[in-house]
Amino acid sequence: MVAGSPELPSITCHARLSRFILCGVFSIRDPMTKRFTAFVSVLLISFSIGFAAPAASASVLHDTPVATAVGSLPPKTCDISSNLDTTANVYISACRKASIRKVFPGEYLGVVLLKIKRDRTATGKKAWKLLNDQRWRK
């Protein structure tokens, strides 16, 4: 290694992707390239670990079954009371105009309509009101 550069005694470049990236960062001599490469390697490592994944912001999302939220079938009718087990995203795609997505709260797109109906927060009430508003009907 170059004199004055940090030593990495236990890192071997062939062991893992993150270690390989770090070895590449410390073998670069240009300071600007080293910073850019370090930045890119931190991004890659954080995406692979999952630090950059967005966290669920609404408490409504935590008790939604995954199979219900992911595997919802398109509704046969557009009556909201008969589609309470459908996610808002599927219901909007099948029964509402696309322009509702501009004003619909994004954190409720993957939530089942029954949970939106029971939610008493301001955004939950807004989501339910928009789903029932007739001006968004196809």
Image (tube, helix red, strand yellow):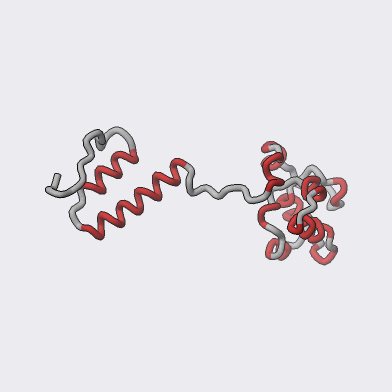
Which image quadrant is residue 102 in? Answer: bottom right
Which image quadrant is residue 73 in? Answer: top right
Q: Is residue 103 left or right of residue 117?
A: left
Viewer-nearest residue: 71 or 84:
84
Q: Residue furthest left?
A: 3
Residue 50 position within the rendered picture, expressed as x and y whole percent measured from the top left:
48, 43
Identify the residue at image location x=71%, y=60%. 104
Residue 5 position within the rendered picture, expressed as x and y whole percent measured from the top left:
18, 48
Identify the residue at image location x=76%, y=54%. 121
In the rendered view of the protein, which quadrant contains the N terminus?
Answer: top left
In the rendered view of the protein, which quadrant contains the C terminus?
Answer: bottom right
Identify the residue at image location x=21%, y=51%. 28
Viewer-nearest residue: 136 or 54:
54
Identify the residue at image location x=43%, y=46%. 46
Q: Is residue 13 left or right of residue 109?
A: left
Residue 77 position within the rendered picture, expressed as x and y whole percent measured from the top left:
85, 49
Residue 137 position within the rendered picture, expressed as x and y whole percent measured from the top left:
82, 62
Total marks drawn? 0
Viewer-nearest residue: 78 or 15:
15
Q: Is residue 2 left or right of residue 87?
A: left
